Amino acid sequence: MKTEEDNRRIATQLMNTAMTYARVILKRYGELGPFGFSMSREGEVSRETLEIPRLPDDPKRQWKLLGEHMAARARRGVVQAVAMAANVSLAEPSAEGYVDAVAMTIEVEGGYAIEVTVPYKIYGGQLKNLLPRRIAVGKVTMEERQGGIFTHAGPTLVKGSEQHGA
């Protein structure tokens, strides 16, 4: 059985991996669609992908499909934790004045679930990318939430945000 410390360590590892990926994609493309990472029973972290011929244009539909995919993997018992993330517009600007954020839901088998919001702002990227993009990250907020992937209730978006993306 996992302890609270184990759950936090797993969640932190998934959050750091997801934010590293988000920063790379935002820096390269300036936008971000829904994405996910999982941790196997052996502790290996990998990005989750959807094996469908055409991804829908609607980020909310992508989020739903990704959540269904991750819930199926959880039901089969092949993952011990998951992180789903999306690019969102904050209902109110962050303390730094940022209006965009990466919103994540992270769940560990056994009931531990958190909601993480990482506000950000993109600088640069103008003049046909002559000025390289730089991603400034604001203060991370975290709160406990009700699980959905391992309880089969399905994923939900972060409260107080509107999803947008690729």
Image (spheres, rainbow, N blue to C red):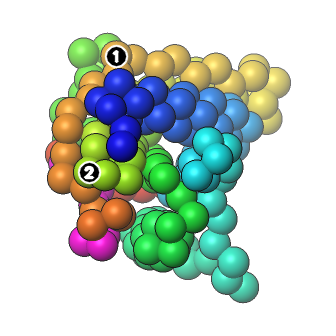
Question: Looking at the rendered structure, which numbered label has been put on residue 139?
Answer: 1
On whether residue 155 falls in the magenta region, the answer is yes
On whether residue 114 falls in the magenta region, the answer is no
Helix, strand or loop under label 1: loop
In the rendered image, the residue lying farthest to the front is 1
**With 76 as the anchor, is 118 left or right in this view?**
left
Is residue 44 in sight in this rendering? yes
Is residue 66 in sight in this rendering? no
Q: Quadrant of the N terminus?
A: top left
The dominant secondary structure in magenta is: loop
Q: Quadrant of the C terminus?
A: bottom right
In the image, the segment drawn in magenta is 152-159
What's the amino acid at mark 2?
Answer: Gly
| Residue at image location 47% in from the left, 34% down from the top | 10
What's the amino acid at mark 1?
Answer: Lys
Q: In front: mark 2 or mark 1?
A: 2
Classify 14 as above or below 70: above
